[in-house]
Image (spheres, rainbow, N blue to C red):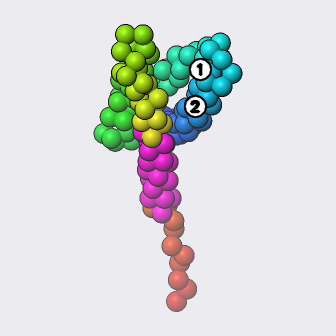
Amino acid sequence: MAQRIARPIHIVVAWLFVAGLLVQVFLAGMGVFSGPSSFIAHRDTGYLLTLVPVILLVTALVGRFGRWQAIAAAAMVGQFILQSILVLQRDSVPAIAALHPVNGFLILLIAVWLARDAWRRWQADRGQSSAGSIVPEATVG
């Protein structure tokens, strides 16, 4: 029962996360071109998005999406922690802080993979379950 509920939640959350990450890139661009005060929305959205990989990790495990889904979600949890650490380095080691956008794009890449893989697995599982329920027509002899 829990697996059946977790699977569609996982897929929806994964794709919403991808959309949220794209918004995050836009907000970073607004911060660059509109001034430092615009980075507040980027920062706050980033903190909000930090919770999503944790949700994806739980739904991947409960939904039994496989080891790689759980590893990808756990990796993104770590990457979000790293994002905050990288920003803190901007004054002391700017070259390290400059890895913040690179890590952000890696998060986006993993998130897209996770969402696509989850969708494919769900579709494949649905195809197998519906294929098993097809009742062959009786032949009239």
Task: Residue 22 in the image: state x and y as whole percent.
Answer: 58, 35
Q: CA distance from mark 1 to mark 2?
A: 8 Å
Residue 34 horizontal side relative to residue 61, left or right:
right
According to the picture, the residue beneath numbered tag 2 turns out to be 25
Q: Amino acid at mark 2?
A: Val
Look at the numbered disc 2 and give the secondary structure of its residue: helix
In the image, 109 versus 54, the foreground residue is 109
According to the picture, the residue beneath numbered tag 1 turns out to be 42
Mark yes or no: residue 62 visible: no
> Quick one: which residue is furthest to the bottom in this view?
141
Q: Main secondary structure of the magenta part?
A: helix
Q: Is residue 101 magenta?
A: no
Task: Residue 17 in the image: state x and y as whole percent.
Answer: 54, 32
Residue at image location 37% in from the left, 10% down from the top: 92
* Marking on residue 111: none
Q: Residues within 10 Å of mark 2 (few under 14, many from 20)?
A: some
Q: Amino acid at mark 1?
A: His
Give the quarter of the image for residue 26.
top right
Residue at image location 44% in from the left, 44% down from the top: 113
Magenta span: 110-131
Q: Is residue 120 magenta?
A: yes
Task: Residue 35 in the image: state x and y as whole percent.
Answer: 66, 17
Residue at image location 42% in from the left, 10% down from the top: 91
Q: Earlier in the sequence, mark 1 or mark 2?
A: 2
Task: Residue 37 in the image: state x and y as whole percent.
Answer: 65, 12
Residue at image location 51% in from the left, 65% down from the top: 134
Mark yes or no: residue 98 visible: yes
Look at the numbered disc 1 and give the secondary structure of its residue: helix
